[in-house]
Amino acid sequence: MKTAIYILVITCMNEVLMNPVKLSQQHSDFKPLEQPFFRATSAKNKLEHLQKMLKKVKETCVTCNELSNTLNQNLSITLQEEGNMHINRAKESSMTTVPSLQSRVENILRRSPHKEQKLQKKLPGILRMEMEMEEKYTSKNLTECSFTCPNDKSLFPCVCDPCEKSINCSAIGNLTQLYQLFNSISFPATKFDTFLLSSPPQLSQTLGSVFLDNTFGLVSFKEILVENTDVEQVMSQAFNGSENTLAKLTFRWNYNLKDFPFAQLASFPYLETLEVSGGSLGSVPAFSKAPSLAMVFLNQNKITEISPMAFANLPELTVLDLGFNNLQTIEENCFYFSAWAVITYLDDSNISFIHERAFSYHQPGYLDVSTNKLTALDQKVFQPILDFIIANEYNSFVDAEENPLCCSNITWILTSPAYDLYTSLSIPPCTW
């Protein structure tokens, strides 16, 4: 096998070196992608990985069945054989260029023990992200631009788009000016779809540290996006007026943001997506009841503490991202989910300990604890999660790669073909 791969690689390299003109001709018809003004959202990035994986899985369904048959015939697999299996997976993954999350999900689907099924069931969170992307990229009828905007001069430096029903205030001088503008001029129509305040990454705006109460006056929005500013605090009544319209609220790459009014989310019964990422949040309080909130992104902050029952009042939660923080320990009831099968990201967060009752009600449908400091995968924590994924036949797994695991602490996984199938580990998986 190694010799065959070596010959294939050398042959491909020779073809490229001997025929550079041919290679360039093959790509001459491709135009470079336009770089978006705004960076992609967390949901978009993760969804794109999963979408690419699902396109490839049909090509590997035969291999999937072969692996399933092999595993079913060898239920008494030994630790040595298990080690060989990890080596084989490493060889397979080294030949792919897909993003890491995509390759992990593709790997677990290819090794699915449900050999009669070409695809397993999609998690609710995947379906939710797909729905959001479809809504975002559905073309609008731009010929219907009957919406009435304020006078251009009075709204300056903000810009109103009557076709998109949006206001872009990316050229605003400061947050006080933003407040004064919305509370002083006359708006012929007050129900907008989108508010945008964003700067290119290299031109972070100095707008002032506080997003003020009643910033938007009598104007309401369905979506509010604020990114790449120096705001430190969002006041509790900042979004007054949008209680019955706001569906998506995004504050990202505001690196100084430390204070956000999570307690006020109960005032927004139609809020579905919340993103407060790339800031300096230090803790996560218990969310008040938010009946529609489905996706929460709190990644890339400085969070060290999660309140017990923090997400218990989010019955529609499908995606929770707390990756790239500094959690260190996960205490009892931190992830008491009243929602079913939540996709949960806790990667790159210096986690060394997870309480056996951290996930104390519904189990997550997918769990990423990769790139942390775990030396063990406590059976009391992880077995219920794996049992849940397996029983529901989800296209999912537990990602525990890049942890300093001790082999004696994960023997219960290594000796079980079923649990090993649904656990993604590094190569080698552990040390003695």
Image: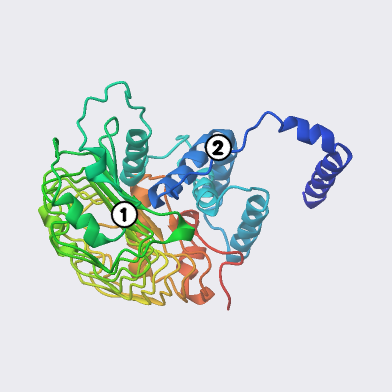
Which amino acid, mark 1? Answer: Ile
Residue 364 in view of the camera: no
Left or right, 402 with respect to 196, comes to right
Image coordinates for residue 196, horizontal then vertical, percent: 31, 48
Q: Quadrant of residue 142?
A: top left
Residue of label 1: 172
Which amino acid, mark 2? Answer: Lys
Q: Nearer the viewer, residue 183 or 404?
A: 183
Name the secondary structure under disc 1.
Answer: loop
Pair 2/1: label in front: 1
Question: Which residue is most to the right?
Answer: 18
Please tell me which residue is depicted at 41% across the width and 40% down the height of the picture: 120
Please tell me which residue is depicted at 35% across the width and 36% down the height of the picture: 136
Q: Are marks 2 and 1 in contact (CB under 8 Å)?
A: no
Image coordinates for residue 374, horizontal then vertical, percent: 45, 74
What colour scheme has been applied to the protein in the rendered image? rainbow
In the depicted structure, whether residue 127 falls above or below residue 351: above
Which disc, if any, is residue 56?
2
Q: Nearer the viewer, residue 234 or 128?
A: 234
Image coordinates for residue 218, horizontal then vertical, percent: 10, 47
Please tell me which residue is depicted at 63% across the width and 48% down the height of the picture: 97
Left or right, 410 with respect to 390, comes to right
Please tell me which residue is depicted at 67% across the width and 53% down the height of the picture: 94
Q: Quadrant of the C terminus?
A: bottom right
Question: Which residue is most to the top?
Answer: 143
Q: Earlier in the sequence, mark 2 or mark 1?
A: 2
Name the secondary structure under disc 2.
Answer: helix
In the depicted structure, whether residue 195 falls above or below residue 230: above
In the depicted structure, whether residue 391 falls above or below residue 63: below
In the depicted structure, whether residue 130 falls above or below residue 294: above
* Mark 2 closeness class: few <14, some 14–19, many ≥20 residues within 10 Å: few
Residue 30 in view of the camera: yes
